[in-house]
Amino acid sequence: MIDIRHKPSVLDRFSRGLAFYWPIVIVSIAVFVAIYIFDSQAEKSHIEDRRAAIADKLSPIRAQLEGNIKSDIKLLQSLAAVIETEPSMNQSRFSDIGRRLFSRPMRLNDISVVYNKTTAMIYPYLPNQGMVGRVFSTNPEDIKAADLAEKYNTFIVARPNSASLNANSLRIYYPILYAGNPSVASRATNKHAVNM
């Protein structure tokens, strides 16, 4: 016969089982936490290694792009100096200078001189002659960049936009002090600055 008084209750059995298995439960939780921490650290380390590898590969490209843009800016500064010393320059003389500049391998697509938001001179002239006498751009970003170049009397490199003829080109705006009037900006379109 079974004595009902001595039969352990469910709660007693559970507490005895818990007392027997609690070290196993704690060790299991500790192992899972350790695995999770190790995995997250390994993932962070992998991401940092990939970032460093990409930065190492991009550094020479970045340096080359910066050098190309800086050389184009120096070229524009030289052209601005010529235009400032020859305030009566016409399209023919500007084309002669442009032809000389473009006689060697060049990253520039075109160079134009803008006066009061209107294109005054451009090189190469034949493919772009329709631009002469017209507003240089209807894009607000281009107009803002030209205004900033005039306001701060420094070059401004404008990012590519979809309204340009060549969507993969940067535009460099450089102010020219033209017969005492700083409202002339030289604009050059750099075709390879983004694609290199």
Image (cartoon, rainbow, N blue to C red):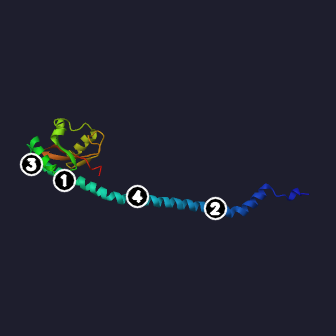
Amino acid type of disc 4?
Answer: Arg
Inspect the image, locate mark 3, and give the three-letter code of the amino acid beneath it.
Thr
Q: Front-most of 95 and 142?
A: 95
Q: Are marks 4 and 1 in contact (CB under 8 Å)?
A: no
> In the rendered structure, are the residues bearing label 3 and label 2 in contact, judged by CB atoms less than 8 Å apart?
no
Q: Which residue position holds label 2?
A: 28
Give x and y (percent) for residue 30: 61, 62
Calculate the distance from the C-alpha at mark 2 to the C-alpha at mark 4: 35 Å
Q: Earlier in the sequence, mark 1 or mark 3?
A: 1
Specify the label residue 51 is tagged with: 4
Is disc 4 surrounded by few (<14), some (14 to 19) or many (20+) residues within 10 Å?
few
Percent from the top left, x then y, of residue 117? 19, 38
The residue located at (30%, 56%) in the rendering is: 62
Label 2 vs 1, first from the N-terminus: 2
Q: Is residue 4 above or below residue 87?
A: below
C-beta proximity under 8 Å, tags 2 and 4 = no
**In the drawing, what numbered circle is on residue 85?**
3
Position of 19 compared to 55: left or right?
right
Which of the two discs, 3 and 4, labels the residue nearer the N terminus? 4
